[in-house]
Image (tube, rainbow, N blue to C red):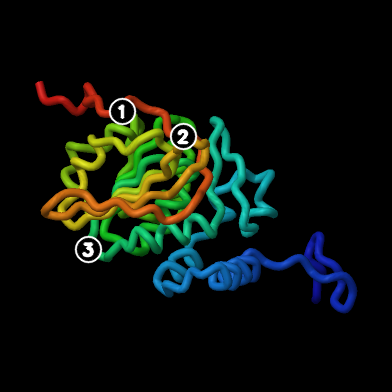
Amino acid sequence: MNRKRRGAAPRGGVEVPPTPGATRARLLMMLRRSGVIDEKVLAAVERTPRDAFVPAVFRDRAYEDTALPIGSGQTISRPSVVAFMTAMLAPGLRMRVLEIGTGSGYQAAVLTWLCRRVYTIERHRPLLSEAEARFQRLRLTNITTRCGDGVRGWPRAGLFDRILVTAAADDVSSVLVDQLAEGGRMLVPIREHDGVQRLVCLTRTDSGVEVETLRETSFVPLVGAYDEPDPQEVAP
């Protein structure tokens, strides 16, 4: 016996609402048109259901290329921004990645397909708890989470091959730079004096740190204690 899906229009009439998979496919087409051509990044985005990372009220907009509120004054970034930053970060399967600002957990989930382990820090406990529940439901086992001040990083975890900051800072934290391994790369949005945010890429070399400005961007502000040690990380 054939049954009509609830909310679906009859065949031959108004278009049937697309399934999440079909919507995700259109998102990938948009990402390619926007210049994201790294097939590994595109595959990671395809495997990560963005609709699982947005509040239920916005689920029908999950695959639009738009930022959406997730609570605590934070947002989930546009898919095109996540894809671009992931491609510029250039993670490798043997790498350890530190993310500053877990938020919904979407960016961390995308990274799990591209590196050995993701360490992610979120200062808002409710957001972190929700993200942890999503990671568990999706069986993403190579993520380590922490609630704390992301500006201070995670020094007890050692050096990182890649660091990704997902909020706009007033300056680059030297504490984070010190946690970057030689040859490592860090992406951070910087809020400049003209009010414009610019995404900056820092690469640590044996002679210092190379800085490259990639493009203008837009993120919520990064809140934290700059260049001060975290009391929880100081050895007794």
Which image quarter holds the N terminus?
A: bottom right
Look at the picture and state if 177 lies above or below 93. Answer: above
Q: Which residue is mark 1?
A: 226
Question: How packed is label 2: few (under 14 Cα within 10 Å), some, or many (20 or more)?
Answer: few
Secondary structure at numbered mark 3: loop
Q: Nearer the viewer, residue 233 or 167?
A: 167
Q: Confirm whether residue 132 shows in the render.
A: no
Q: Which mark is residue 122?
A: none
Q: Which residue is mark 3?
A: 94
Look at the picture and state if 152 lies above or below 114. Answer: above
* Residue 65 horizontal side relative to residue 125, left or right: right
The three-letter amino acid code for the residue at tag 2 is His
Image coordinates for residue 69, horizontal then vertical, percent: 60, 40
Residue at the location (16% across, 55% down)?
Answer: 205
Q: Nearer the viewer, mark 3 or mark 1?
A: 1
Which image quarter holds the C terminus?
A: top left
* Residue 16 horizontal side relative to residue 37, left or right: right
Q: Confirm whether residue 44 shows in the render.
A: yes
Mark 1 to mark 2 CA distance (whole Å): 18 Å
Image coordinates for residue 138, horizontal then vertical, percent: 45, 55
Residue at the location (51% across, 37% down)?
Answer: 194
The three-letter amino acid code for the residue at tag 3 is Arg
Image coordinates for residue 30, horizontal then vertical, percent: 60, 69
Mark 3 to mark 2 CA distance (whole Å): 38 Å
Outermost residue toward the front? 194
Q: Which residue is mark 2?
A: 193
Image coordinates for residue 62, horizontal then vertical, percent: 62, 54
